[in-house]
């Protein structure tokens, strides 16, 4: 049951991360960066830099976290398995 819960939390984390990345990619296209009235009342406004930081910042951080997690996962798969090696969990 614990393994299922951890897997479900990881899946939810990946989904949330992908949502934030998609939102960060879409944000410059959703607002008109040449017209301040389209983003003046948004979070981080009235400055364009604040709006982009608030709306794109979490997506950038999530993208970096997803990239790092995927890279670690691939690196773990590429490690050679030593036959006959004693691991702490199998020594009991």
Image: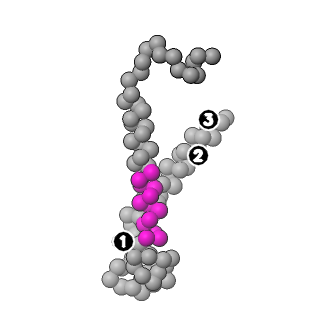
Q: Are marks 3 and 1 in contact (CB under 8 Å)?
A: no
Q: Helix or strand or loop: what does disc 2 sit on? A: helix
Q: Position of residue 7 (x, y in %)?
A: 57, 40
Which residue corresponds to mark 3? 3
Q: Quadrant of residue 39?
A: bottom left
Q: Is residue 54 magenta?
A: yes
Residue at mark 3 to residue at mark 2: CA–CA distance: 10 Å
- The image shows residue 60, relative to residue 35, as above or below, that is above
Q: Helix or strand or loop: what does disc 1 sit on? A: helix
**First reached walking from the N terminus: tag 2 or tag 1:** 2
Residue at mark 2 to residue at mark 1: CA–CA distance: 30 Å
Within 10 angstroms of label 1, few (less than 14), some, or many (20 or more) residues? some
Q: Is residue 75 magenta?
A: no
Q: Are marks 3 and 2 in contact (CB under 8 Å)?
A: no
Which quadrant of the figure contains the C terminus? top right
Which residue corresponds to mark 2? 9
Q: Position of residue 26 (x, y in %)?
A: 39, 66
Q: Could you tell me which residue is drawn at 44 percent across and 75 percent down?
A: 51
Q: Residue furthest right?
A: 1
Q: Helix or strand or loop: what does disc 3 sit on? A: helix
Q: Position of residue 85 (x, y in %)?
A: 47, 16
Which residue corresponds to mark 1? 28
**First reached walking from the N terminus: tag 3 or tag 2:** 3
- The image shows residue 1, relative to residue 11, as above or below, that is above
In the image, the segment drawn in magenta is 53-65
Q: Main secondary structure of the magenta part?
A: helix
Q: Quadrant of residue 33?
A: bottom left
């Amino acid at each position: 049951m614990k393994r299922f819960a951890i897997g479900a939390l990881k899946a939810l984390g990946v989904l949330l991360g992908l949502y934030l990345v998609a939102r960060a990619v879409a944000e410059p296209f959703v607002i008109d960066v040449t017209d301040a009235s389209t983003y003046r009342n948004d979070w981080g406004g009235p400055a364009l830099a604040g709006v982009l930081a608030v709306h794109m910042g979490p997506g950038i951080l999530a993208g970096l976290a997803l990239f790092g997690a995927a890279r670690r996962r691939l690196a773990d798969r590429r490690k050679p398995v030593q036959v006959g090696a004693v691991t702490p969990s199998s020594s009991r």
